Amino acid sequence: MTTADQSTDSTAPGAPVPGGGTAPGGTATLAGRIVARIGFGAMQLEHADRDAALAVLRQAVGAGVNHLDTAQFYGGCNALIRAALAPYPDDLVLASKVGADRDADGRLVPAQRPEQLRAQVEANLAALGVEQVGVVNLRRLDAAPGIIAEGDQLVDLDDQLAELVALRDAGKIGGVGLSNVSADQLEHAVPAGIACVQNLYSVLDRTAEPVLDRCREHGIAWAPFFPLGGAFPGRPKVTDTPTVVAIAAEVGVTPAQVGLAWLLSHYDGMLLIPGTSNPAHLAANIAAGDVRLPAASIAALDRLAPSN
């Protein structure tokens, strides 16, 4: 993807999508395909009631969401997506993640070796019931948050990229993405053709800003995880932040919508993947694509965290 690719995208609310209807938050490019900038993250569905999970997935796609973020190691999320949506709409992009797995006791463990990455891709294909996963994001485990790779799980990035590029060349992956990487790692990987980057990022935590800057430079999509903060103990929640709460009251929206709208305003290639099993929360997340924050509000939000 090039910077020029991003310039052809529409970020206007209600922008059309290839499959018809409108795109929440406008559109951007992901692995050469046009998607709504507000997508859906499936991770929270692992512990949801099955019927509720199926209903919320159908609600999301019915509302114009055409980019779903999942992973085989999330538990039964891939099976839920297949049950809810197969046969899949032509414009739906399924993005999965590899680099971790579950052990016999269900604990999350590193799975960074190339042969493990290939096995995970095959498992995703089987569980989702597809011949190609639209995007596969490599979750590096060099640093927090989450589990850290040790021993034989310390694998060179080039070896991992070679395996994923081979799978892309074989048609099993539509695009290769990266997750939890540094700016130097992204720059090193760019020649392999990177479709998107997923890093921890929100209005309260912009330590990954240098990585986002590289995405801007190369026209790479950016899909921040935990976009509203608060996912780990001790991390503040965007929705509890006084400045965010005050702006929400002034604009007449929810604090969560303020946090999501700020992200959308921050980069045209921003793809949001908030997750929920609650239909009302899903509707509110999708409606955040129509929120336009005043310049003074954006400036106040910009001051909440340093860009370092």
Image (cartoon, rainbow, N blue to C red):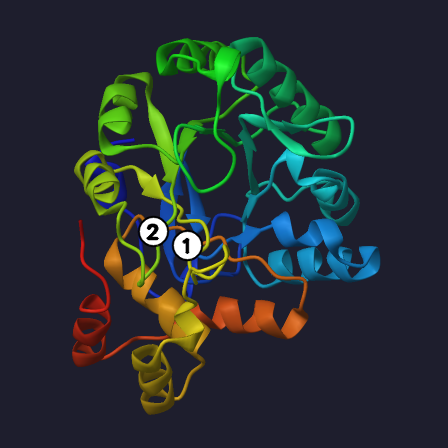
- The answer to the question of whether label 2 and label 1 lie on touching residues, with beta carbons closer than 8 A, is yes
> Which amino acid type corresponds to the residue marked 1 in the rendered image?
Arg
Q: What residue is shown with label 1? A: 37
Residue at point 28% right, 76% down?
293
Residue 8, position as x, y percentages in the image: 26, 46
The location of residue 215, given as percent across then percent down, is 25, 38
Query: In the image, is 209 to the left or to the right of 201?
Result: left
The correct choice, above or below, for 171 with respect to 273 in the image is above
Amino acid of disc 2: Met
Q: Is residue 158 above or below residue 206?
A: above
Single out the mark in the foreground, 2 or 1: 2
In the image shown, does 105 or 131 lie closer to the viewer? 105
Of residues 36 and 103, which is closer to you in this image?
Answer: 103
Instruction: Please tell me whether residue 158 is drawn above or below residue 217 in the rendered image.
Output: above
Residue placed under numbered mark 2 in the picture: 270
Residue in view at x 64 percent, y 16 percent? 119
